[in-house]
Image: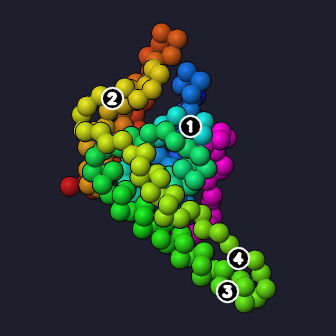
């Protein structure tokens, strides 16, 4: 098993972790970097179509916001998330796409006035709908087989409706390892 931190390494936004299990690639979260452009996510070291599946801790955009871009780049695997997270993403990813399109239009308008080139949105509503079509709803507490030697269970972590920490059981060459991704934790009460 190999693990590589793609985002949220110097700050809390842009959560994204790459796992390699039995020669197949998985992501835990696929978040958008937000706020001041101090740190940017590094590029994925594999092509989007090579990603087998994504495990999503919760719907906040800094954990889910690049899923439409992943779809745009050719990802067609499943996105495992709790059923409520799937419902929220159905709204939030469309909204995020609308924001991307509006921002690109606004920047392009200004650019054209000054003779510069127009810009493309990071993704559009069709890409968001593509990502939404890949969502695979899971229930809290149920262990789901998600790939070759990979099982997952979502547990309530009390951060947002549908939010979860994700337990992953990874079996490789007869050895089982368990790794837990907390996602965002809390509020305190
Ligand atoms: Zn959050």
State the image coordinates of residue 56 (x, y, percent, origin top left): 41, 45
Q: Quadrant of the C terminus?
A: bottom left
* Disc nearer the start of the sequence (3/2): 3
State the image coordinates of residue 112 (x, y, percent, origin top left): 72, 85
State the image coordinates of residue 43 (x, y, percent, origin top left): 66, 49
* Magenta-colored stretch includes residue 45: yes
Residue plotted at (56% across, 32% down): 25
In the rendered image, the residue lying farthest to the bottom is 113
Q: Residues within 10 Å of mark 2 (few under 14, many from 20)?
A: some
| Viewer-closest of 102 and 36 | 102
Q: Quadrant of the N terminus?
A: top right
| Viewer-closest of 21 and 179 | 21
In the rendered image, the residue lying farthest to the top is 174
The residue labelled by disc 4 is 118
Q: Is mark 1 within 8 Å of ligand 1?
A: no
SS at circle 4? loop
SS at circle 2? strand
Is label 3 in contact with label 2 (beta carbons under 8 Å)?
no
The residue labelled by disc 3 is 110
The residue labelled by disc 1 is 51
Prevailing secondary structure of the magenta residues:
loop
Residue 56 appearing in the image: no
* Disc nearer the start of the sequence (3/4): 3
Residue plotted at (54% across, 50% down): 71
The residue labelled by disc 2 is 144
State the image coordinates of residue 121 (x, y, percent, origin top left): 60, 68
Q: Which residues are magenta?
A: 34-48
Residue 164 sits above or below residue 87 on the image: above
> How far apart are labels 4 and 2 at the CA level?
45 Å
Is label 2 in contact with label 1 (beta carbons under 8 Å)?
no
């Amino acid at each position: 098993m190999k693990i590589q931190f793609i985002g949220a390494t110097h700050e809390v936004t842009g959560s994204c972790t790459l796992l390699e299990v039995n020669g197949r690639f998985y992501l835990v979260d696929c978040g958008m970097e937000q706020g001041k452009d101090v740190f940017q996510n590094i590029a994925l070291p594999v092509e989007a179509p090579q990603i087998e599946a994504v495990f999503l801790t919760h719907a906040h955009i800094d954990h889910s916001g690049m899923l439409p871009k992943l779809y745009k780049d050719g990802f067609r695997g499943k996105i495992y998330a709790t059923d409520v997270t799937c419902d929220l993403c159905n709204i939030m990813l469309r909204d995020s796409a609308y924001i991307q399109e509006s921002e690109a239009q606004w920047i392009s308008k200004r650019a054209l006035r000054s003779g510069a080139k127009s810009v493309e949105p990071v993704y559009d509503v069709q890409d968001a709908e593509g990502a939404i079509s890949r969502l695979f709803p899971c229930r809290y507490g149920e262990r789901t087989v998600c790939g070759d030697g990979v099982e997952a269970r979502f547990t309530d972590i009390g951060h947002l409706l549908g939010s979860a920490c994700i337990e992953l059981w990874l079996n490789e060459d007869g050895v089982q390892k368990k790794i837990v991704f907390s996602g965002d934790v809390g509020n305190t009460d």
